[in-house]
Amino acid sequence: MSKGITVPGAPVFILILSFLFLVLGTADPTSAGAQAQTFTLAEAVKFALQNNNEIRAAESSLAAKQDDIGVARSGLLPKIYFEERALRTNNPTYVFMSKLNQGLFTAQDFAIQSLNQPDPYNDFQTQFFAEQPIFVPKAWVGVDMSQREHQAGSIDLSRKKEEIAFRVCQAWLMVHTARAQLDAAGRGVEDAKEHYRIAKLRYEADLGMYADTLRASTALAESRQRKVTADKQTNLARRMLGLLLGLTGSADVEGEIPDFPLKDIDDYARSSQARGDIRSMELRYENAEKNIRMTETDYLPYVGIGGGYQWNDPANLFGGSGDSWQVSAFLRWNLFDGAKREYERSKAKHQARQAQENLSGMKKAAAYGLYQAQLGLEEAKANLELAREALKTAEEGTRLVQMRYESSFSPIVDVLDAQVALDRARVGVVARENDYRVAVLNLGWESGTILKDLGIAQDEKKE
């Protein structure tokens, strides 16, 4: 058997490693011991509008659309080119032309032998050339379309902010709900402990059966399991809130749950038909109509002017033994391109009709979404009233059964069943309260007024 190796100072080494693990674990913002940031609802929404990754991506997309305007406008601006060429040839035409451009042509170059069979010759040509479009209808339409697309993208960004605000509200309320459910589970554990204590005392006083003690112990274990699950749901809800806020770890809530205003349904209906995604779709439908005009510009000519200056030299790059200039005007007209323009125009018309149908469908979907949200609110309100009533009856029923059990008029099973019903009623009220608040916010989301309803619409507009 091999002997173990003894490392001098091993306890010290272990202590150092333990200290490093402790420091690294404490420094990790996502570790269990890290202190999560806390937010009120308004703070959470505003923080998300600045830091949410989806919103940042949408802002970059909008910036790209702004650059598209510059790309389209560049078609109206002059183009300036610089070119340097190096040529060596014995082609008679090129040799003759190169000597003329260099200003080095002599009478001897008219000799028939020199013209027909010239020696190899070098030419270095430096040229600046500019071209300015004059009549470019396709570029004009392109600028207009890119500006409209940028406007649509800006509205899309506003709608994305509304979406994130709604999701943050849901997550924030879910944390509140999870914490309340965790509290309810904790009270269930305390009640189960009390039932077990009473059952044990009755058994020790020969007033109850040992089976009652076992049943109470089982109920206590089950209530503890429910508390473990509630604790997990609370941690998940906090982590989801942090994700929406753009954090790497969890976030927590603070402050009271605000009252959300509930407006007349007609106000929501009017707003829903002018919400961001519908307005951006209207702009894109206009662009689809403009695209038909874009394809029709291919039937028109392209007119522009141009000019340049060049230097030629037989030996040096960028040399200038000879120089010349030119100015030109041109008209370029595509008379036939294999029916490509006809197919593109037909395609554009189909795409415009597609955009029109999409817009019509979106308006109908917005009306349906609002109708669904309205029914959801009515359902949530009714369920909340029923849940509160159920809690009252469960509390009273548990109290009465407890009294009957302590007086030996009811078995322990009745007490445990009543306790289970009470725990469910407590959790049910918390869940229904959250459902009602989300239903109110959902009306604002479907109508496009959620930021205004939250009182932060002005902040969003200033960004």
Image (cartoon, rainbow, N blue to C red):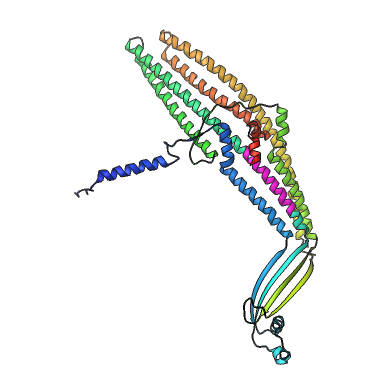
Q: How many marks?
A: 0
Tell me, yes or no, whether the highlighted magenta stretch contains residue 152.
yes
Q: Quadrant of residue 335?
A: bottom right
Answer above or below: position of 214 versus 93. above
Can residue 283 be seen here? yes
* Residue 358 appears in view: no
Horizontal and vertical percent for residue 161? 62, 39
| In-image side of 125 versus 303 (left or right) | left
State yes or no: residue 48 in magenta: no
Q: Looking at this view, is 66 or 372 the one in front?
A: 66
Residue beneath the point at 61% across and 48% down? 60
x and y percent of residue 245 in the render?
A: 54, 39
* Point 71% across, 56% down: residue: 72
Place of residue 435 in the rendered image (x, y in percent of width and height, measured from the top left)? 58, 27
The image quadrant that residue 27 belongs to is top left
Relative to residue 24, is residue 91 drawn left or right? Answer: right
Q: Main secondary structure of the magenta part?
A: helix
Q: Is residue 276 left or right of residue 194?
A: right
In terms of image quadrants, where is residue 268?
A: top right
Residue at x 45%, y 40% (from the top left corner): 29
Quarter the C terminus occupies: top right
Nearest the eye: 264 or 102: 102
Residue visible at 69% across and 53% down? 69
- Which residues are drawn in magenta? 143-162
Q: Position of residue 38 (x, y in %)?
A: 51, 33
The image shows residue 54, relative to residue 124, as above or below, that is above
